Image: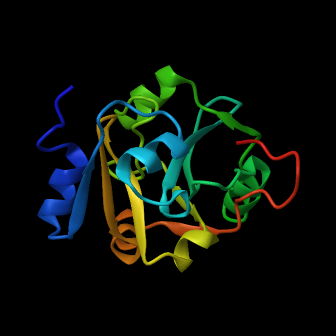
Amino acid sequence: MIVPISTRITDLLDTHRISYRRLPHTEPVFTVEAAAAQRGVVAEEMVKSILLREKSEPRRYVMACLLGPARLDPQAVRAYLSEAQEWKRLTFATAEEIRAVTGYTQGAVAPLCLPADVPVIFDEAIAHCINVNISSGDLMLGLELRQEDLTRLVGAQFAPIAAREAGSIV
């Protein structure tokens, strides 16, 4: 496979003059461990982006982001969102929903270039990173950039959304 010259995300970073490092893959990756190995980085700097959907109609979506080794607590995401407006039970979006809502294929999701009505919540642990790695929107390319640049560009909210005990979800 050929590594893309640009994606919607690299175009956005370039437009905002945000420095980043391209981390091409030799093959598509679908796990944090595989992506870290392909990119030559540590999993603790990988930001995984998980699209959740409200189970009831009308559907609302939220992007939850946490560091590679962490597990997501969807109830913590719901509790945080419900502080401002009531949210019903959250579940994981399907591959079809991921594509329809974000424009990305599953495994290449990033917290950038999302619809305005999709809030982005970062786990508070991300704030402690200097650099982070995200998907470029393409399965063959990752990106490394400063956490503060990503946070500013995303307009992310920080909350404790990583699972704190055994039996966590993702």
Residue at 14% x, 70% y is 17
Q: Is residue 152 visible?
A: yes
Q: Is 1 in front, or is 148?
A: 1
Direction from residue 139 to residue 60 in the image, left or right: right
Q: Which of these two is toward me, 16 or 58? A: 16
Q: Answer yes or no: is residue 115 visible.
A: no
Instruction: Name the residue: 66% across, 64% down.
Output: 84
Residue occupying the point 51% across, 23% down: 95
Quarter of image, res 65: bottom right
**How is this picture coloured?**
rainbow
> What percent of the width, then of the height, locates residue 56?
71, 30
Query: Compared to 78, does 19 lie above or below?
Result: below
| Quarter location, residue 85 | bottom right
Q: How many marks?
A: 0
Instruction: Give x and y (percent) for residue 140.
Output: 29, 36
Residue 148: where, in percent of width, then height?
A: 39, 77
Residue at the limit of the structure toward the top, as seen here:
96
> Going by the image, does 34 lie left or right of 13?
right
Q: Please state which of residues 34 and 65 is positioned toward the viewer in this rendering.
A: 34
Horizontal side of residue 147 vs 170, given as left or right: left
Dividing the image into 4 quarters, which one contains the C terminus?
top right
In the rendered image, which quarter contains the N terminus?
top left
Q: Is residue 20 left or right of residue 60?
A: left
Residue 165 in picture, x, y percent from top left: 87, 57
- Residue sitting nearer the eye, 14 or 54: 14
Q: Tell me which residue sits at (50%, 26%) in the image.
A: 97
